Amino acid sequence: MGDITDPLGRALVVEQFRILRKQVPVLYAVLLVDSISVALVLPLTVSAWLRFGLPTALLALCLLRLVQWLRLKAVDVSPEQAHRELRRTRVVAVVLNAGFVLWILALFATVDPDLRAPIALLVFMGCIGTAYCLGSFPPASLLTMLIAGTPIATVLLLSGDGIMISLGINLLLLLLLLGRMINTNFRSFVQLIQAHSSLTQEGERARAAEQTATAVAERFDRALNNMSQGLCFFNEDQRLIVCNRTYLEIYDLDPDVIRPGMKLTDIVDLRYSAGSAPKMSKQDYLDWRNSARVIDENSDTTVELTNGRMVRIRHRPMEGRGWVATHEDITERHRTEIALAEAKAAAEQAEAAARAAHTHLTEALDVVPEGLAVFDKDDRLVLWNRQYTEFYAVSQEVLAAGTRFESILRAGLSRGQYPEAIGREDEWLAERLARHALPRYSHEQHLPDDRWIRVEERRTADGGSIGVRIDITDLKRREASFRLLFEENPLPMWVVDSSTRQLLAVNAAMCRHYGYRREDLLLMCEPQLQYGGSDSSIDFELHRTACGDLIQVAIESRPLHYEGRSAHVCVAFDVTERNRAQERISYLASHDVLTELPNRTALDHHLSAAVERHEITGAGFAVLCIDLDHFKEINDLFGHAVGDAVLRETSLRLQEAAQGCYVARVGGDEFIGITDQVPLSASAELLATKMRAAFEDPIEVDGHTLKLDLCVGAALFPRDADKIDSLLANADAALYRAKHEGRGAIRLFTSAMDQQLRARRALEHDLRFAVERGELYLDYQPQQHRDGHVIGYEALVRWRHPERGIISPGEFIPVAERSGSIAQIDDWVLMEACREAASWDRPFRIAVNVSAAQFRRENLDAQVRMALRETGLQPSRLELEITEGVLIEDVSRAKKAMQSLKRLGILIALDDFGTGYSSLSYVEAFPLDRIKIDRSFVASLGQSERSLAIVRAIIGLAHGLGVPVLAEGIETKVQMSLLIEEGCDEMQGYLIGRPQRDAAVGSRSKPRVPSLIHSAS
């Protein structure tokens, strides 16, 4: 048996067991047949026990082992288990063979000598069969021959019979030959197992090496493709060896197309096709690329691509004229560097401007006769003028930027600058600092040389302070004439006893201002002038005049000795009108100027208070979004003055219908109503119904009778939303549904509306990126002259949404106008249409629609000029189509804008004529090159005489002004024949040609310039 302590022995044991498992059934079958054969040839004289008893016991043991081996037939065993079973097999083989030998020897002793040879041969044949079956297990096989064969052969040799002796000798020789053969085969078997084990180990090592190589290759590929830089290798034949994903992404190359072995020229062709090539011709680029200076030398180059990208290329040659290069996209870095440079220049300019402004300010302050000083929130000196320096000349040396106010005071105290502080410096300093810290304060200050100044100090919003020093020396010197000054002062002034508050003296201005006679005032005490208690939160007092009017006065008082009594002289500044103006400003800040309704700011405060109230009481409320139907038409038809009057009347009717509920105007013709009456749903619908009912009677303005109606959408707090923004959005969604369903509709918010609102917002979001992602494209519909030849095409924008497919302009254009993304779409359509038309070999006209938002922009002429310049399109081939409604919004501005466009040499067409206002005055006033009859009139031709009459009138009007006419929406030959009969100049419609993306491709002779926007996306 093999040694299970080494791999070869373990493999040998398992293989021995596997072969033995197949041979054991044969072994026991041989033993069974051999035993039966011996039993059959025995004479009847042999006892039954010897004939059947002993072989039956041995055969039972054989059957038991056979069953055990059959159970192990489908079991995968370990080398240890196989070793254990082989040991058992060896023991069983010894027992069985010993048993059979004893049985045969017993038979030899009882049977006739004539039967000994047949029995010996039968037993020996069984021994040979057993040894053969155990050939892969030499211990058991050799033991079988030794135990079973050798005794039989020995008995034959010792029988004394010549035949028996000869038979015994032959059997012994056969045993020797069989034993040698088994040993030889077993050695071959062991060598085979050893070779198989070696092959298995080599295979495992090969698989491990293959896995290691695969892992290394995967790590290399992962590292290569996760580089932030593009990498490519080319051999000496300029064929690609390898490149990473970043290289393909930088140059917009298809990974399925770029393969190792491709020629550089083929890759360059693909880059030029993708719009990611350098800004030079392909041949120039290849000449530069193949030059010896580039191929053989290290180089670092920054290249600008046609799609706007900036790429830094680091080229390193390899042996054999091959090379490796890294490509880094530095577009954003380049832009950032440019932006930083511009920002730095702007900052430097701003700094220079600030220095200049500071110089101008300082020069201007130096002219002011008052002394001025500005301190920051830390009471450090920031700014002062020359007069301030002259006032405090004694402490001039400490007046420097950054000096603290207290340090300036201490320097003045040390130099005797404040005569009133001599002897009480610390007390005076504390009082002065306390006054300086007040929000506002005014006092008189005595300086050396008997100079007096008035100090006016005010704290600023940021915590700093502004101080004004006014020279009152002359005033103080005229103190002897105080009475005269007191009497003639235009401000109300009085002297009051400090203890009793009795009025001791009043001036004429006070008598006039308060309406009392001087005698009556001198009998009054100061509190009798006051109305109500004092309030420290306000900076004025409330006084009552003789006629009962209340006035607001700011009182300034100074202590003095008057006729030997301690008193105060007071001056009253009437701030009534100022405060009223402040109140009016505060009111206007929270109310709409036109309607005096609360504005959006006030609405936000009201909603916040309602939410806070809900958190305390649990009370909800309903928000109503209110919109006037077709209010824009009133502004367009009758002007903004009439529109403003309508809004004022609307606000009055809404307030009256609200019956105390909150109403606010948030912009244009949009109003908000709020009710907290329960049940909320019913009260919201009732309030909306009352508001609609308020407009059953028309509004009369300047002789115009105007019939209005409302659309109302409502949302409930907190049922529909627990946030203010979400609540307003949901109410707006309900309003949107109400407007969609028709005039005068009232709708409460539902979850379905929320889904629609989300869908609309999702559409708005996707539309913002549609141009960048290249999802928009243009269809071109031909325009035909009446003689049958095509004269131009109209560009019609389409949107191919990646998930929703084709979305019609009627669905996404209104969304774009509301969300503001229409400007980007307008610019793209204009540029793309001009680029396409410039690629045609025939000078067809290209018509582009101008949206209302685009026409209102101040730079429309500049945008058109740029499109013409960049695409090379002749101005005479570009026609802009403008609708009537855009023109009448501001006729003077529209006329000026159209004149600017006409100076560029382009054509202007009036689109959808007949559906709006169709005023002869602006048709004649504006420089129009073409009038387009709306498709709604063309569709009824041949069916309605009225439509024919309108078309005839429009054609006659246009021809009378010398303007050609184009009819759109032609779908039948009858419509075309009628238009030709009426003298229509040009036609457009499905009958002539449907809008197609490549409708004009046959007109293109030169390759179309790729869109920069598409390339960038």
Image (cartoon, rainbow, N blue to C red):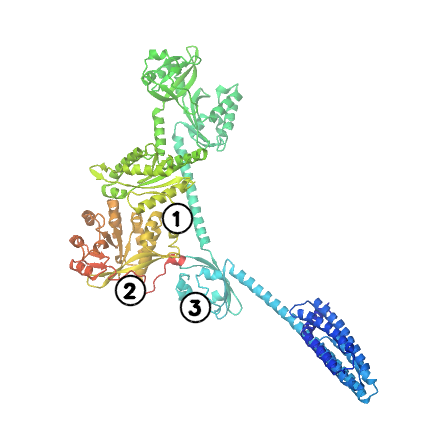
**Which residue is under mark 1?**
755
Q: Amino acid at mark 2?
A: Asp
Q: Is residue 287 visible?
A: no
SS state under label 1: helix
Check whether the beta carbons of the residues at disc 3 and disc 2 lie within 8 A of each other.
Answer: no
Which one is nearer the viewer's eye here, 296 or 845?
845
At label 1, counting other C-alpha atoms closer than 10 Å, the crowd grade (few under 14, some 14-19, many 20 or more) is few
Reading the image, the residue beneath label 3 is 266
Q: Is residue 673 left or right of residue 89?
A: left
Say which residue appears at 42% left-offset and 64% top-offset.
271
Q: Earlier in the sequence, mark 3 or mark 1?
A: 3
Tell me the number on the disc at residue 659.
Answer: none
Q: Is residue 676 left or right of residue 840?
A: right
Disc nearer the start of the sequence (2/1):
1
* 23 sits left or right of 764 in the view: right
Q: Position of residue 622 (x, y in %)?
A: 38, 38
Residue carrying label 2: 841
Q: Quadrant of residue 126?
A: bottom right
Task: State whether residue 780 is above or below residue 452.
Answer: below
Q: Position of residue 98 (x, y in %)?
A: 78, 75
Tell which of 854 and 26 is nearer to you: 26
Residue 514 image offset from top left, x and y in percent: 33, 17
Q: Is residue 277 above or below residue 586?
A: below
Q: Is residue 187 above or below residue 799?
A: below
Distance in Å between CA atoms under marks 2 and 1 = 50 Å
